Amino acid sequence: MAPMPTRNISIRPEAPGDEDAIDTVVRDAFMQQFGSDSEVGLVRTLRSRGELVGDLTLVAEVDDTIVGFIAFSEVTLDGVCAGGLGLAPVAVAPAFQSDGIGGALITASLERAAAAGGWSFVVLLGHDHYYPRFGFVPAAPLGLIGDYGAGASWMARPLNGLPLPAGHVRYSSAFTDPSA
Ligand SMILES: CC(C)(COP(=O)(O)OP(=O)(O)OC[C@H]1O[C@@H](n2cnc3c(N)ncnc32)[C@H](O)[C@@H]1OP(=O)(O)O)[C@@H](O)C(=O)NCCC(=O)NCCS
């Protein structure tokens, strides 16, 4: 189970005016973890192209300050839209990590995706220690193939009890060529 946040957080969809604060959270989280801020450009590109799924792309606030962010964009399955979502990125400001905020964002967005209807599965590339608690399982052994290898970090989760499909998942070209 994800830890329950000990802070008083609120979660809402991102809104115009949040962009700079989101950049800061994503930059700080990814620089600390991976030494790269390329996810900032990815988020900007997805947003400018209208490829962020609005109802599911959420911010977490503590005392009216944005400290967490989660984004979703549609993925294709064998080249067609099939109700697939890519979860990327999720970030929590370093000073606020390991307090349940990332888990709260993931749980809230998955609940929203299930309730929205039309979405049937979610994929992500992430740490295999963290995401199983939210229902994610290794995707490659089930025949769900991505472009980022077949290791345990390539994961998928069905929505609304639907079976996970097999096929080749492809993210938006923003993931491989943010300038295109
Ligand atoms: C990953 C992240 C979003 C989790 O948010 P969070 O608010 O710290 O997470 P929670 O408090 O809900 O959960 C804490 C758990 O996540 C684990 N965790 C946090 N970051 C992790 C990471 N990068 N890899 C593996 N596990 C991680 C913690 O060890 C802890 O595990 P435990 O419950 O077994 O002790 C956040 O740590 C972050 O922004 N990391 C840097 C960016 C990143 O790696 N994003 C994900 C890329 S797929």
Image (tube, rainbow, N blue to C red):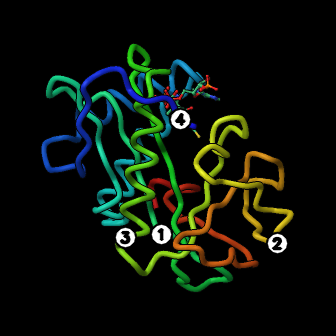
Q: Are marks 2 and 3 in contact (CB under 8 Å)?
A: no
Q: Secondary structure at mark 4?
A: loop
Q: Secondary structure at mark 1?
A: strand
Residue shown at the point (29%, 41%) measured from the top left: 59
Q: Earlier in the sequence, mark 1 or mark 4?
A: 4
Q: Is mark 4 within 8 Å of ligand 1?
A: yes
Task: Name the kind of residue labelled 1 in the image.
Answer: Glu
Task: Name the kind of residue labelled 3 in the image.
Answer: Ala
Q: Earlier in the sequence, mark 1 or mark 2?
A: 1
**Mark-to-mark CA distance, 4 and 3:** 21 Å
Task: Name the kind of residue labelled 2 in the image.
Answer: Gly
Q: Secondary structure at mark 3?
A: helix
Q: Earlier in the sequence, mark 3 or mark 1?
A: 1
Q: Earlier in the sequence, mark 2 or mark 3?
A: 3
Pointer 4 local density, CA inside 10 Å: few below 14, some 14–19, many at least 20: some
Pointer 3 local density, CA inside 10 Å: few below 14, some 14–19, many at least 20: few
Disc 3 target residue: 115
**Mark-to-mark CA distance, 1 and 2:** 19 Å
Image coords of residue 14 (percent x, y)? 23, 49
Disc 4 target residue: 2
Pointer 1 local density, CA inside 10 Å: few below 14, some 14–19, many at least 20: many
Residue shown at the point (61%, 78%) measured from the top left: 162
Q: Which mark is residue 143?
A: 2
Disc 1 target residue: 74
Q: Is residue 37 above or below residue 53?
A: above
Image coords of residue 36 (percent x, y)? 54, 28
Image coords of residue 32 (percent x, y)? 52, 18
Q: Earlier in the sequence, mark 4 or mark 2?
A: 4
